[in-house]
Amino acid sequence: MAGRKQHFIPQALQRGFGVAKGKKTQVYVFRKGLEPYHSSTEGVAAQRDFYSEPSDEQSLDDKITTYERTVLAPAVAALREAPAGPIDSHVAAAVVVHLSIRSAFLRGSFSAAATEMLDHFADAMRSDQTARALLEVDSLKAESTLVKLIGEEILSQFGAVPESVRNALAKLVHFRAREKFPQMFPDLVAMLLQQLGMLLENIPELIVSGHSKALDSDMAPALRVERLKTMNWQIVEAGPPIHFVLPDCLAVGSKTSDFQKLEPYSLLNDDELAGVVMPVCSSKVLVGCLSNPELDVASLNRSFAQCSLDFFISSQADAQTAEAAQFIGSTVSKYVDCLVEKQAFVAPDRNASESPETEGWAQEPVKVPIKFEPSSRKNGKAQAAVRSLMNAPELQVGLRTVEAIVVADNIVRSLHQRGVALNDYTAQVVRLGTCHTTETSDGVSCQLFITTEAVKLVAKNHPLARAAAALIRHQAGRAVYYATVVAKIPKEALQRQRPLLEAVGLRIAHFFCSHYFGGRLSGIGRSSDEEFAATDGLYSQTLAGCVQGVTSARLHFIEHRDVDVALGQALGHVEQLLCATANACATTGGEVDRWKASKSVETLRALSLGDWFDLFALDLERFFDSRERLAGDNDLVLLGSHIERVLWSFGIVLSTPTPEQIWMDVLADEQLENTRLMLMA
């Protein structure tokens, strides 16, 4: 039976870094933040019951002791006595792997990383915005935590119903969870923080248990050994005044053959490794490399210190070694910080700048040609008024995509003359101005159309000039949206083949997102109570028309079963509703609470869309705030999914029998009522 004081760095290895005094070997131990001390190897790198407690049966420590006596000690002795030059790769690989995985360094590093991650997790859970990111509440990906949980629960409860019904129900539940998350958050965070506290207390025990089981299973994991056996190994020797220290991680690795950046070997993946270094005594290091190593032996002690977690062992306590000791733990600390930084748990900082609308945009004014139609309307004062409005810094990135600003008495006629086909709905939409886009090989080209009347109001400083100016700048703000999306989202992502329903959602999302950007960048600032009341009135009128239109589309389908006509009508009115809602959200600049007591939101609540309004505003604001960090189309796809959410409140459920098709199902009146109750619960 082995003793209870169990060495996680064998004395057979430690003795190469000390001075023999009788039957014992004395070494210097440099601990992080402490003065070095002199000690016998019997008391260094040892801990009571580190591997296992005493047992009548063969314990893990018994197995390690046997392995050490029969395999490890002879191998270490052979490496230490070998002359400088090539060495057997099998022996080298087995020694490096075994010593690295048995050490306390591995437990300590994993414990530090796990503790830091859980602390960061706990901090993230104290904000509903960071918690949303952490729990992947707003992800539609099949592998996201919430989507998987909902899918599994739906399958277990409704496994007998058709897949299309289960998919629709899963979407509905996910959307409802997103809408209700702010209300659920306080109870959820209390429960999770309690669980985290318990987990933090148990981390050391869990890591010890896992480490012991891994060692008991394999003293030198074959896959790691095989990877190291592919390297060319050699002993590199150095004479005085150079001496090597033994780090508590035992071996360090490099991702490049020049060994410029060394990290603890046990924290690197096998496929990352280009080279490995392990000291075997104070005058020799074991070096493995896939090519010819470029090793600066004079700088190794500092790297060994940096890669240590708590301490290193040395044969000397000179000034250079003491200086190196100041860096103990720095590499592991960076490793843990990197793990934390990879987690996107940080919510956007709403207070990062006093002028969030202008942050990050191009500042140099762009001179875009201004065309008046008819040309007789052109005058210097009107042109100067438009130019002044377009000089705002936050608009410049969009204006770089604008070919011309067209000032017209009749925008519909101007578009017709340019070959743009408009139906009754789109003609109504562009009447007061538009940002007309054309795809080019370089991205998107825009033309801004604004009314002569709006320009006159601004030029004459009319009482309505503020509203007219906002209307003009709105179109330039939409150009900013298209410029930002084209610049930030890879073209292959936007143009890839996707299911028809997702493609339709993306097209409509582009449209209402551009209007949200236009509203946020219109320069109107915080609207007065009178302006807000006027906006509420206009929004209410638009909602009433959209509600009537979608309801009519539903009734048309019930009566005629004509999917194409009914679906076209429904999508057209939902697009109008989403665009109007995006504009409404933008008018308050993110202050969505101003809408709480409005007539418009009362109408939405009656349709089971009250909570949805808040979520839609949140999604839009988050998308707007992330404009400088866009890398893909996930947020746009998420915004496009709001189309289905609105249609559920009218008893319309869309599905995709094939990627090229959209099918429309309509709920009976009783089912519609039950669905609305569920969406308001």
Image (tube, rainbow, N blue to C red):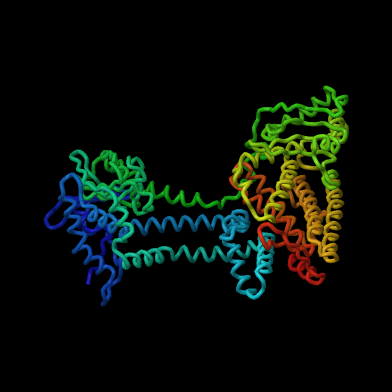
* Left or right position of 285 against 504: left
* Left or right position of 205 against 154: left
Quadrant for the C terminus in the image: bottom right
Quadrant for the N terminus in the image: bottom left
Q: Residue furthest top?
A: 380
Vertical placement of residue 10 versus 34, above or below: below
Residue 562, quarter of picture: bottom right
Q: Residue 288 at what x, y percent from top left?
A: 27, 48
Residue 515, quarter of picture: top right
Q: Nearer the viewer, residue 97 or 165?
A: 165
Residue at x-position 86% and y-position 36%: 413
Vertical placement of residue 333 versus 480, above or below: below
Residue at x-position 54% and y-position 58%: 122
Look at the image and tell me whether residue 180 can be seen.
Answer: no
Q: Residue 58 at what x, y percent from top left?
A: 26, 74
Q: Residue 599 at what x, y percent from top left?
A: 84, 55
Q: Residue furthest bottom?
A: 56
Vertical placement of residue 491 versus 121, above or below: above
Q: Residue 313 at what x, y percent from top left?
A: 25, 50
Q: Nearer the viewer, residue 292 or 646?
A: 292
Residue at x-position 24% and y-position 48%: 233
* Left or right position of 133 against 327: right
Look at the image and tell me whether residue 240 can be seen.
Answer: yes
Vertical placement of residue 223 versus 209, above or below: above
Q: Nearer the viewer, residue 40 or 255?
A: 255
How many numbered marks does the figure carry? 0
Q: Nearer the viewer, residue 629 or 131?
A: 629
